[in-house]
Image: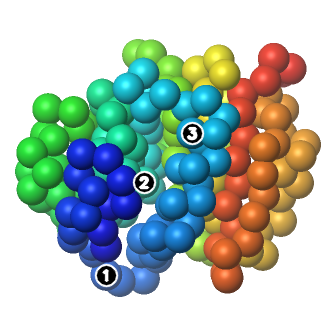
Amino acid sequence: MRIIAGAYKGRTLKTVSGPGYRPAMGRVRESLFSRLESRGVVWGECRVLDLFAGSGSLAFEALSRGAPEAVFVEKDPKAAACLARNAAALEAESRCRILAEDVLRITARRPAAPFQVIFIDPPYGESLFSPTLKNILRQNWLAENGFLIAEVEKGLRLNAEKQPGLSLISDDLYGQTRVILWTSSHDQE
């Protein structure tokens, strides 16, 4: 898998194979990053959080485009080791923090500082998206005017327009993948 744009453009990321791993396709990443940039995202000012990081393709793309810091959360030891190898290959270790921990445990507590961009890409069929989203909103992980991106299975029952504290920007299908983009809003409960 290759990075699309920025300082690491064309560089290859190693991936982990096995059940539940689906690196974000190039066309999905390209569309998503174009949409974020058209909404005013300035990567040089963004702290990025990648939950259920897998290979980290989304956060590494953000780092390539200038994000000063990315935090990757991935409990699988093989995937966490792959993230560390990718960070080393890109010589980006100083800008990466890899937490080999459970996402729900991490997000159940308040962060030291909120993130401007959060990616959530849980394994399909494991019912992890809703509790993760609730934790993020309850514990204030998302910065004011920040963006939250979910990559979930097509059939996930979720009313993307009715999420307290979030304003829907887009809800798109790419084959069996549903990509939802929200921004934080001021109606948080």
Report helix, strand or loop for mark 2: helix
Expressed as whole percent of the image width and height from the top left, the position of residue 27 reads 53, 70
Mark in the foreground, 1 or 2: 2
Mark 3 or mark 1: whose residue is earlier in sequence: 1
Quadrant of the rendered structure where residue 92 is? top left
Looking at the image, residue 29 sits to the left or right of residue 19; the answer is right
Q: Amino acid at mark 1?
A: Ser
Residues at marks 3 and 1, CA–CA distance in whole angstroms: 30 Å
Residues at marks 3 and 2, CA–CA distance in whole angstroms: 14 Å
Residue designated by label 1: 17
Mark 1 or mark 2: whose residue is earlier in sequence: 1
Relative to 163, does residue 55 appear above or below in the rendering?
Answer: below
Mark 3 or mark 2: whose residue is earlier in sequence: 3
Residues at marks 1 and 2, CA–CA distance in whole angstroms: 17 Å
Mark in the foreground, 3 or 1: 3
Residue 39 or residue 143, whichever sits in front: 39
Q: Amino acid at mark 3?
A: Glu
Crowding at dot 1, Cα within 10 Å, few <14 / some 14-19 / many 20+, comes out as: few
Rendered residue at 30%/28% (across/down):
68
Camera sees residue 143 = yes
Crowding at dot 2, Cα within 10 Å, few <14 / some 14-19 / many 20+, comes out as: many
Query: Which mark is on residue 37?
Result: 3
**Image quadrant occupied by the C terminus:** top right
Residue designated by label 2: 58
Rendered residue at 59%/59% (across/down):
31
Report helix, strand or loop for mark 1: loop
Mark in the foreground, 3 or 2: 3
Tally of numbered tags: 3
